[in-house]
Every structure is written in C-alpha cells, then in structure tokens.
Image (tube, rainbow, N blue to C red):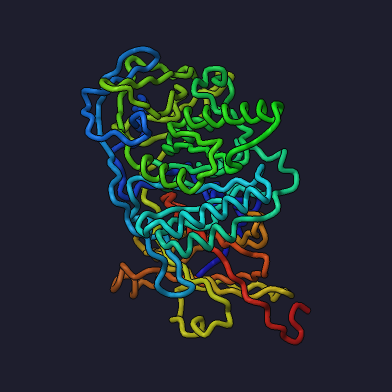
Amino acid sequence: MISRCSALILAFLICSPALFHATQSKAQATPGESPYTFQANTRIVLTDVTVTDTKGNPVHGLPQSAFHIFDNKQPQVITSFEEHTGIPAATILPASTAGVYSNDYLLHLPPVLNIVLIDISNLDMADQMYLNYELTRFLNEQPEGQPLAIYLRAGSGCFIVQNFTSDRKLLLAAVHKAIPRFPPNGREYLRDYDTLQQIALSLSQLPGRKNILWFTGGPKLFLMPDAMPLQNDADWRDLYDDLDQQRIALYPIDARGLFVVSLRTVMALGDQHLTMDSEAKATGGAAFHNNNGLKEITEHILDSGSSFYTLTYSPHDLHFDNKWHKVRVAVDGASYHLSYRRGYFADGSVRDMDQPAKPRTRLLANGEKLEVAPVTAEQPIIFQASVLPESDPAVARRDKPSGSLPAPHAKKGSVPFSIRYTVPIDALAVRKNADGKHQVVFGIAAIALNRDGSLMEHDVEQVTMVLNEQAFRHSPDLPITLDQHLNLAKDDQFLNLGVWDTVNGRFGSIEIPLEVPKPVKHKGAGE
C-alpha cells in the first residue's frame, strides 16, 4: 500500500534538470568509475592535460617522465599517470519500445563525454540559422557510435534537449527543436555564470572528463586562468570548484563566424574573444572565433578533446586557507601546446581519496566555517519509465502496479498522461517499520517544461510503500512499479523524471523530449 506525504519539496526549485539535486547532498555518481575520486582532508589534485603539436594534432605516447607539474611554483611528485587516446566510444541506443525510457546509459558511458551547449542568450536569428545548418551538416556526415548530449541556454536557464545518444536522427531532431527561435526577452540580464552553474550541477551524476562545446554569440563571464583576485568571493570559488570537480573543459565557439565590421565593433569583439580565450584556458579547453567552419570546429574538438593525459598529485604541506593555487604543467621535448586547468582554491571543497566520507569543514570568504556534506560514491538509481497518454491501448495492457498515485482532476486543454516507474528494489533502502513489515521510502518527481525551459506542470511526491512480505521473501529482486498521472498540454515539450531514496541518498533522473497529442474533447471536460 502507499501513503502520500504530499511533500512538494522541490516546487520552488523547478527550473532545470538539476532541480532534483536540491533534496540531497551534492552526490557524484560513479558508474564505471575512474580511479580518481575526491574525498577526505588532504587535497588530491587531478589535472587533465591536452597536448597538441603546432598543427593542433594530439600528441600520443608521451611517458610520465616527460611531464613536470608545479603547484605555486613548487615541483610536485606525480602520483598517478594515464593516457587517454581517443578510446572508441560506447554506443548508446534509444529505447526499443515507443514511450519507454531509461537512464541505463549511465552504465556504459565512454571515458570522455561531449556536450553541445547552444547558447542563444546573445545569438540572433540569422546566426542561429547558420549554426543549425552547420550542426546539421556535421550530424549528417558523422558516423554513429560516439554519443552526444544537447543542451540549450534560452530564457529560463540551461536545460537538456537531448540526453546522451549516438542516434543521429534523435540528435538532428534535437538541434532542429532547439534552433532557430527568437532570442529571449531580457537576454541582457542572462548571466553566463548561471549557465555554467546549472550545467555543472546537471552533469554531476556523470564520471570522467566532460567537454562542453559552447556555441555562443559572445560571452558575458570572465573566468580567469589566474583566479587569485576572486579568492574572497565565495560564489566564484564555488563555480571554480564545480567546474574542477566535474572535470568540465570549456570550448567556447563564436557561432557568429567571421566578421567584417567597423573599428569600434572590432574592439568590442576583441574583448569578447579575449574573454572566450580566458574561459577556455581556465578550464583546460580551447576557444574558437573568427571562423565560419563550425562543422569542422566541432569535428576537431571531438577528435582532439578525446586524447589527453590525466595526472594526479598531492600538494606538499597544503593548508586550507582559501588561497588560489596556481598549477603549471611542462612537457619535455618539442614546442607542444598544453591545455589544462590553471589552478584551484584551497578551501577544503575537494578531499583525498583514502579517508572515509564524512562531513568536513569548509572555509567561507569571511573566515567563518561551514559544515559541508560529504561527496558520496553511490551509483545512481537506474530505472525505467513508460510515458504514454492515458488513451494509449498499451496503458490498459499493463500489469497491475505495486502502487498507484491518485490522478489529478481533468484540466481543460490538456491530455492526461500515465507515467509508470519501474525501480529495482536493490536501489532502495529496505527497512522495517513499527509493525515489523518491510518498507521503502522514496521520492518521485515529474516536471514538464516548455520550449524555453520554464516550468509548466509538476508533481513531486514522497512515497512510503509497505512491501508484500510473502512476495518479498519469495522474489526479493523483483522491481517496484509505481504509476503517476500528469495533465500535459501542447506547450509542454520536455519532461524531467526523478527518483531518489530518502534514506541512502541515491538518485536517478531521465530527461525526455515530449510530443503531446491534441486533447480529445469530452463533454463536461474541465467543468
């Protein structure tokens, strides 16, 4: 049986795919986890280094002895070294059944993730149309196999349009759905700072390096390769920490291409391009501007960005004093070009890998101390969701669920949808209640967004489910099935689903592009 707590714990935080993280500590999921994790009270610094020759081609086969790393000018001992040489990507296929979705792609991710971020906050319609054309060319000619995700920065924030897939048809549909569109009103108030915070949080479930191909019409954020002037600003430190911990490398790309402009405009563009160069340098990526070959730039980043070296070291005699630590990497031999993150804040946000996870103290800008929840290494909840209109015959053919939430009242102009969650029981903490019966307590969330990422509909519930003792003893591995109902309208174009365990903190999410059919008029509907 099911009891509803009616806890709309996320109702005021629903504006991006990252919203589900608001109910838990900032956890990182680690399927196929790399050996490089951040925990404990001493700092392990991980540095991804891209090495290219004078023609921009990746350099392979360099030994560890060729690398030298310095922390605040002090030479460091490299404790681990690994080369990534464009390992063939895993193929992520779409669900085989219409209306059925899963986040099981998290179990077979490639070692490097590439995300296309289309930022229209400062990109006019004509430039969007050209970007659409170039990305269409790229996707039509790119062989399937390497998965991509597509995010859009529009009016209400940065949100996912297509999750990781190697299906080029889905990616093409996502690009055409994202652009062209009219730039958002009040775009001069949209901050790149918020964009990066949102995408870092949205990607926090994913392990490994993430390359962000950031197609933009000119940045408004100044990420400094040397962030020393920002060390007393807690917000900026948090942003640098997020980008660091998520191993995000920015590749800003000026989607406006090559300009023929006046001297005054040239000066303004020069400032923007210097900013793009700084953002890339600060995060270990590369910037591209004054170039109409957006397709070729995309191909180059996917090729070169998948080849890099990963180094780790533990700084000598490190003190958590909020200070910016400069990192410098040198390589013996030819005149190579190196891209890597240029530093970190010593504020206790990242910890050593050998100590148990526990709350730790983090320094604030004013010298005060804050207890920070530990970063856990729990894998995400891998679940499946069937999302269909209630009128679909497949809904009537479903087996009886473990439980079902009451349907909302009919809403004029909307279409009732049925969402069935299928969650493995071993992903949830099974405990005994006061009556000695086994139960699970978990949350579910269904959030519908419009084409601009604004909240349209939502239903967020905490569910207590008492298990059938006989069935649980006989088949303890059977999944839990739960039915949820939501009224959706034509303007609802994206659906975000989340499941989290209220006891162990594990979490999983699925992002779904929506196609809502026209509502069928019924006599008395909405009355």
Q: Is residue 331 above or below residue 115?
A: above
At horizontal 74% and vertical 75% (from top left) the residue drawn is 412
Q: Position of residue 402 (x, y in %)?
A: 45, 74
Regarding residue 173, the answer to whether it shows in the image is yes
Q: Position of residue 474 (x, y in %)?
A: 28, 73
Q: 372 left or right of 265?
A: left
At horizontal 75% and vertical 43% (from top left) the residue drawn is 186
Q: Nearer the viewer, residue 52 or 520?
A: 52
Q: Is residue 448 above or below residue 402?
A: above
Locate residue 300: give its quadrant: top left
At horizontal 28% and vertical 22% (from top left) the residue drawn is 334
Q: 310 left or right of 413?
A: left
Q: Nearer the viewer, residue 491 or 447?
A: 491
Q: 241 left or right of 475?
A: right
Q: Nearer the viewer, residue 371 or 312?
A: 312
Instruction: Name the outermost residue toward the top.
Output: 73
Q: Position of residue 345 (x, y in %)?
A: 47, 23
Q: 101 left or right of 175?
A: left
Locate residue 216: give its quadrant: top right
Q: Nearer the viewer, residue 400 or 414?
A: 414
Q: Position of residue 162 (x, y in %)?
A: 50, 58
Instruction: Name the outermost residue toward the bottom.
Output: 523
At horizontal 45% and vertical 67% (from top left) the residue drawn is 101
Q: Quadrant of the C terminus?
A: bottom right
Instruction: Name the outermost residue toward the front.
Output: 260
